[in-house]
Amino acid sequence: MIPQFATSMAEILPAVILLSLGLLLNIGEAQDRLAKPTISFEPVSGIALEGGIVIIKCAVDINVPKWIYIFRGQEMVFNGTQDSNETAVFTIVNVTSTNRGIYRCIYDLLVPNQRRSSSSNVIRLTVLGTNAPLSILHPAAVEVNVGGKLNMSCSTASNGRCLYYQDSKFQLAEGRNNVTVSIINLSFCDEGNYTCYCLVEVNNSTVFSARSNIMQVTVSGKLTDRPEAKNKFATEGTVLILTSAILGVTLPKRKIAMSQTHIRDETELQDISD
């Protein structure tokens, strides 16, 4: 009986060892596997109009340097580096029918050694055969003095939510169609090219309008007034005042809503100090 038991153990033991090694390898692979990215559109409907705008976002929850790639089918259409775990944003301006298709994103981890993630979920962009409504930013150009005030407004054919950008990168504010946006206490950091576009309803679909004309803002003043370089998205001393009978505002990063001012229907947005 004992010899038979010893023989059985001798046959089983190698299988147990192999199974244990396989489990350890699977655990190691799971720990080494990179987090899967997530891709999405804005507007979330994934619908765009000819000449309009669509925004592609790739979210990666890893706070290390990485290289992000956006694919339409098998073709790479965007790429760029990202140092933090903030969402990478890519914008298609002047959409055409060639932009329709299936999109996904992947990323390469650059440190401590280069590794590639698995592919994200896939999403489909549909381009309707309708021209996007125009957006108009007023005024077309303006020159203001340091410490002065800039008024501007974005209008489109349909009511909707409009977004204001500086140099096509720094989102300044959001508000409804024809909302007046004022930037006071201007500095040289506020100089640049301003644009806007709006999120509107067209044929029961939520879409972006076409990007507006470029409004060139020139800030004049003494060279001694020039401040040190700052992030334009959160310029110290800058206050945005959005005036509307119905105020619909999403606060950008580093902005906080203050109490109602002495002027009716006016709300101040001020920078949050570090």
Image (cartoon, grey):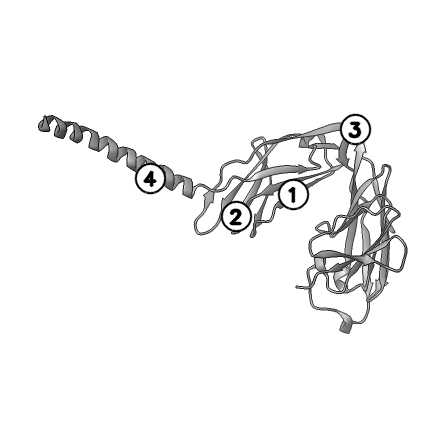
Q: From the viewer's perspective, is residue 86 above or below residue 20?
A: below
Residue pointed to by mark 1: 90
Against 100, residue 235 (above or below) is below
x and y, in percent, of residue 30 in the image: 41, 39
Tell me whether the residue at label 3 lies in contact with that at label 1, contact meaning CB atoms closer than 8 angstroms.
no
Q: Nearer the viewer, residue 200 or 146?
A: 200
- Can you tell which mark lies on residue 24? 4
Mark 2 is surrounded, within 10 Å at the Cα level, by few (under 14), some (14 to 19) or many (20 or more) other residues, namely: some
Kind of residue indicated by mark 1: Phe
Distance of label 3 from label 1 (alpha carbons): 25 Å
Q: Nearer the viewer, mark 3 or mark 1?
A: 3
* Nearer-N-terminus badge (3/2): 2
Label 1 CA crowd tier, 10 Å (few <14, some 14–19, many 20+) = some
Which of discs 2 and 4 lies nearer the camera? The answer is: 4
Task: Give the spatial CA distance, label 2 vs label 1.
Answer: 19 Å
The CA distance from mark 4 to mark 1 is 40 Å
The residue wearing badge 3 is: 204
Q: Position of residue 103 (x, y in %)?
A: 61, 33
Q: Nearer the viewer, residue 217 or 28?
A: 28
Mark number, residue 62:
2
Callout 2: helix, strand or loop?
loop
Circles 2, 1 touching at the beta carbon (< 8 Å) = no
